[in-house]
Image (cartoon, helix red, strand yellow):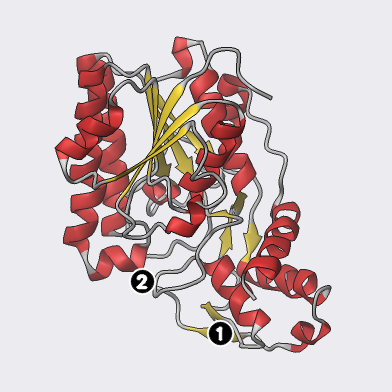
C-alpha cells in the first residue's frame, strides 16, 4: 500500500534494530527514507533488504557532528530520531560518551530540525525515565529520580524537546519505549539485549544467566507495536496530541522467568533438546528497576494506539526469525 502523498522521513540510527525496521516499513508505504548512521552500534546488513531501493538514501554520519545533522535534514518532512547509545551498564561504564551521543547529539538534531522547519520531530524516549518511581502502571506525568547516566540522558531529551516546542514552535513527540524486542535485534556484544542474547545461548545449549531471582518484571514490547506508534505519531493531525510523551508498550508485564520459559518452549519446537537447558541465576544488576509496566491509556486515547502483539505473540515471530538468521 502506498501513501497518497510521498513524504520524506529521516530516520537517525536507521541501521540499528528499531531504525532499520522503521526504514523498511516506511519504504513499503512508498515514502522516501533518509538514514543517518555512523555504524557504531548499527549494522550494514540490517539495510540489505532495501539498500537498493530508489527511495532510500544512506548518509554515513554522526549526530555529534552538527554538519552531518544539517545535511541529513535537508528537504525532510519528519524526523524519527532513534540514534542513541543504549544500555544502562554501558552508561555506567562510560557516562561521557553516552552523554555526548544522547544529549549533545540530540540537541544537534533538534537545532537542525528547527532550522530546516521539519513538520514534526519524533524521538525515542525511554521507560528508564521513570527511575525510582514505584508506581505501577507507569503513567506519563509521574516519574521518579533517574537510576543511571543513561536514564538521565533520556530525561534530558524530553526536557530539551519541550523547550524547543515552547520556544521555537518545533512540534515534538517522545515515545517512551519499554523493552523493545524483535527481528534484527543484535545478540552480540557486552551490551546485547536480553532476548536475542538468551535466544542465541539456548540455540547453542548454553545456560542463560538471569540477573537476580528472575522475578523482576518488564513490559516487553514487540517491534511491530513500536512501528505502529511511530506511524501514528507522524499521522496524527490533532495538535493537542503533540509536544508531549507517550508510553510505547503492550501494557502487560512478564517476569524474566516467564520470558525464559516462553523462549525455551518456542525454541523447542525447532530443537527439542533446548527444553532441557538449565537456567543460571546471578546477582542483580546495578541500575535495574525491579518492575516495569506501562499504562498505554494516553496513547490509546490521543493517538488511537492499538497494539497487536503480546510478549508471547511477538516471541513466536522473533524466535522464527532468529532461528532462520542466527544459525
- In the image, what residue occupies the spot 61% across and 87% down? 207
Residue 147 in picture, x, y percent from top left: 32, 58
Q: Is residue 244 left or right of residue 224?
A: left
Which percent across, then down, holds residue 7? Answer: 47, 20
Residue 220 position (above or below residue 214): above
SS of the residue at dot 2?
Answer: loop
Looking at the picture, how far across and down is residue 89, in whole percent?
34, 68
Alpha carbon separation for disc pair 2 and 1: 15 Å
Name the residue at 60% across, 27% down.
Answer: 29
Of the image marks 2 and 1, the number of the one nearer the N terminus = 1
* In the foreground, 80 or 312: 80
In the image, residue 162 lies at what x, y percent?
28, 26
Q: Nearer the viewer, residue 106 or 11?
A: 11
Q: Which residue is mark 2?
A: 286
Q: Nearer the viewer, residue 282 or 232?
A: 232
**Horizontal arrangement in the rendering, residue 68 relative to residue 128 (left or right):** left
Callout 1 secondary element: strand
Residue bearing mark 1:
281
Amino acid at each position: 500500500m502506498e501513501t497518497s502523498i510521498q513524504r520524506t522521513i529521516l530516520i537517525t540510527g536507521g541501521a540499528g534494530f528499531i531504525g532499520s525496521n522503521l526504514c523498511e516499513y516506511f519504504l513499503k508505504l512508498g515514502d522516501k527514507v533518509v538514514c543517518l548512521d555512523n555504524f557504531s552500534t548499527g549494522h550494514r546488513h540490517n539495510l540489505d533488504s532495501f539498500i537498493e531501493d530508489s527511495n532510500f538514501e544512506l548518509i554515513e554520519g554522526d549526530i555529534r557532528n552538527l554538519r552531518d545533522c544539517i545535511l541529513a535534514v535537508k528537504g525532510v518532512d519528519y524526523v524519527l530520531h532513534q540514534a542513541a547509545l543504549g544500555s544502562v551498564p554501558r552508561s555506567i561504564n562510560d557516562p561521557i560518551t553516552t552523554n555526548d551521543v544522547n544529549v549533545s547529539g540530540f540537541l544537534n538534531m533538534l537545532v537542525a530540525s528547527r532550522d530546516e522547519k521539519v513538520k514534526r520531530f519524533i524521538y525515542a524516549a525511554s521507560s528508564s525515565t521513570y527511575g525510582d518511581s514505584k508506581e505501577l502502571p507507569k503513567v506519563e506525568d509521574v516519574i521518579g529520580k533517574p537510576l543511571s547516566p543513561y536514564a538521565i540522558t533520556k530525561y534530558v531529551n524530553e526536557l530539551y524537546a519541550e523547550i524547543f516546542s515552547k520556544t521555537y514552535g518545533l512540534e515534538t513527540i517522545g515515545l517512551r519505549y519499554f523493552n523493545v524486542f524483535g527481528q534484527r535485534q543484535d545478540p552480540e556484544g557486552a551490551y546485547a539485549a536480553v532476548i536475542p542474547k538468551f535466544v542465541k545461548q539456548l540455540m547453542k545449549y548454553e545456560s542463560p544467566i538471569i540477573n537476580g531471582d528472575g522475578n523482576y518484571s518488564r513490559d516487553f514490547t514487540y517491534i511491530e507495536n513500536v512501528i505502529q506508534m511511530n506511524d501514528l505519531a507522524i499521522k496524527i493531525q490533532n495538535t493537542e496530541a503533540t509536544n508531549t510523551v507517550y508510553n510505547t508498550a503492550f501494557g502487560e508485564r512478564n517476569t524474566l522467568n516467564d520470558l525464559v520459559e516462553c523462549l525455551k518452549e518456542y525454541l523447542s519446537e525447532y530443537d527439542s533438546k533446548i527444553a532441557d537447558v538449565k537456567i543460571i541465576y546471578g546477582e542483580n544488576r546495578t541500575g535495574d528497576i525491579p518492575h516495569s509496566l506501562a499504562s498505554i491509556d494516553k496513547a490509546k486515547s490521543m493517538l488511537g494506539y492499538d497494539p497487536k502483539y503480546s510478549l508471547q505473540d511477538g516471541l513466536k515471530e522473533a524466535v522464527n526469525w532468529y532461528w532462520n538468521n542466527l544459525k
